[in-house]
Image (cartoon, helix red, strand yellow):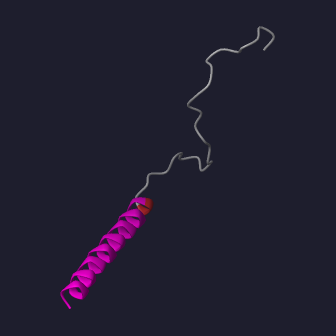
Amino acid sequence: MGISTLRQALLRIVMIAGLCATAAGCISDATAPAADSSGTMQMRYYGGPKSPMWASQ
């Protein structure tokens, strides 16, 4: 009987942690700032060469 109550307590802790993580994700999505005020969704380009590889470009 002691193992059963320990298992229930552990399950309860895991469920509460999952609910907190879900709530935190929803809150962060709701409070995320807009990327651009013009309303266009554009991805940023962070990588790649700064100059063309070939002279013809």
Residue at screen point 22% across, 84% down: 3
Q: Position of residue 57 (x, y in %)?
A: 78, 14
Q: Nearer the viewer, residue 9 or 15?
A: 9
Residue at screen point 43% across, 63% down: 30
Q: Is residue 39 magenta?
A: no
Q: Nearer the viewer, residue 28 or 13?
A: 13
Q: Nearer the viewer, residue 8 or 13?
A: 8
Q: Quadrant of residue 23?
A: bottom left
Q: Is residue 8 magenta?
A: yes
Q: Position of residue 27 (x, y in %)?
A: 38, 64
Q: Is residue 28 above or below residue 13?
A: above
Q: Viewed as shown, does residue 7 lie left or right of 50?
A: left
Q: Viewed as shown, does residue 27 lie left or right of 51?
A: left
- Picture quarter with the N terminus: bottom left
Q: Which SS type dominates the magenta stretch?
A: helix
Q: Is residue 15 above or below residue 57?
A: below
Which residue is farthest right? Answer: 56
Q: Position of residue 33 (x, y in %)?
A: 44, 51
